[in-house]
């Protein structure tokens, strides 16, 4: 069973607010990812990290930022949320040389 | 650019009625093809990885197969608990591990 946790599960906020989505994993995985998924649509990679102090942008442009100060923790931050940021954000982790991803349960963000 | 197309978009089966889901892909050098299961409101759960044409993997009522252009997920005698969205994803040799391109998924509903 995968041990990767996301908080909050659901968040409704007003435009202009700063938000941070938390993601933690206890498997000791070096690689972590943030995917974005709209209802009925594909998952798109927005950020990934190879390890501590490593962050890269994914294929889908995003106004969010990430940090990786500890192996187990990969938070995503939106400085000023807008309605276009409304989506589900999925965090995942994996061992270095594999595409087998372990996903969290997701954070569903609604910006009014 | 890697592309993944899944069909059908939705599939409704009676319990015990076997069927197949299709995943067509174009990728520059396939490193791996992945099947995930996603329940409503949850993150995807890893099912299978296939690496080369002709490879097959089985798990309970599910069997995944791979050719050079597509993959099939065969469901034998499905049960209502098999109802979920099934996602296909590819990882190309030109990218880092874990950067997956996902299809939009097939929503499977199994009626008792």
Image (spheres, rainbow, N blue to C red):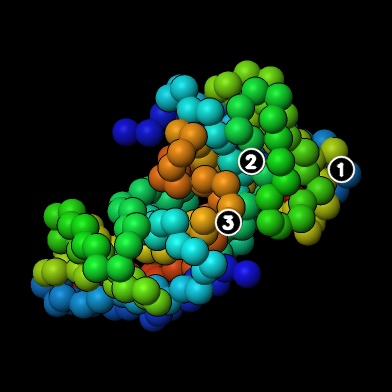
Residue A76 at least partly seen: yes
Q: Position of residue B34 (x, y in %)?
A: 39, 57
Nearer to us: label 3 or label 1:
3
Residue at horizontal 81 percent and vertical 48 percent from the top: A63
**Please, which chain is the residue tagged with disc 2 on?**
A
Q: In the displayed structure, does residue B14 sit left or right of residue B44?
A: left
Question: Which residue does the numbered mark 3 point to in the structure image?
Answer: B94
For the N terminus of chain B, which image quadrant? bottom right
Q: Are marks 1 and 2 in contact (CB under 8 Å)?
A: no
Q: Earlier in the sequence, mark 1 or mark 2?
A: 2
Q: Secondary structure at mark 1?
A: loop
Residue A48 is labelled as: 2
Q: Secondary structure at mark 2?
A: strand
Residue at horizontal 39 percent and vertical 81 percent from the top: B8
**Please, which chain is the residue tagged with disc 1 on?**
A
Separation of residues labelled 1 and 2 (CA atoms): 21 Å
Q: In the displayed structure, does residue B53 sit left or right of residue A64?
A: left
Asked if residue B101 is positioned above or below residue B74 in the image, the reply reads: above
Q: Secondary structure at mark 3?
A: loop
Residue A80 is labelled as: 1
Query: In this rendering, do the residues under marks 1 and 2 share a single chain?
Result: yes
Q: Position of residue A37 (x, y in %)?
A: 59, 57
Q: Are marks 3 and 1 in contact (CB under 8 Å)?
A: no
Q: Are marks 3 and 2 in contact (CB under 8 Å)?
A: no
Disc 3 packing (10 Å; few <14; some 14–19; many ≥20)? few
Disc 2 packing (10 Å; few <14; some 14–19; many ≥20)? many
Asked if residue A55 is positioned above or below residue A82 in the image, the reply reads: above
Nearer to us: label 1 or label 2:
2
Q: Quadrant of residue A77?
A: top right
């Amino acid at each position: 069973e995968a041990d990767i946790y996301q908080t909050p599960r659901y968040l409704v906020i007003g435009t202009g607010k700063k938000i941070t989505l938390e993601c933690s994993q206890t498997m000791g995985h070096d690689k972590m990812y943030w995917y974005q998924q709209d209802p009925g649509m594909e998952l798109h990679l927005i950020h990934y990290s190879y390890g501590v102090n490593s962050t890269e942008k994914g294929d889908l442009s995003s106004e969010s930022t990430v940090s990786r100060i500890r192996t187990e923790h990969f938070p995503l931050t939106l400085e000023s949320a807008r309605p276009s940021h409304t989506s589900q954000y999925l965090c995942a982790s994996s061992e270095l040389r594999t595409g087998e991803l372990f996903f969290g349960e997701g954070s569903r963000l609604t910006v009014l | 650019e890697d592309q993944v197309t899944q069909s059908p978009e939705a599939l409704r089966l009676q319990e015990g009625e076997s069927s197949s889901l299709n995943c067509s892909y174009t990728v520059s050098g396939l490193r791996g093809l992945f099947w995930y299961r996603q329940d409503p409101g949850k993150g995807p759960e890893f099912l299978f990885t296939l690496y080369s044409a002709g490879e097959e993997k089985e798990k309970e009522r599910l069997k995944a197969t791979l050719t050079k252009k597509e993959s099939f997920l065969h469901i034998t005698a499905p049960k209502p608990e098999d109802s979920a969205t099934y996602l296909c994803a590819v990882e190309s040799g030109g990218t880092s591990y874990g950067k997956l391109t996902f299809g939009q998924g097939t929503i499977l509903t199994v009626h008792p």
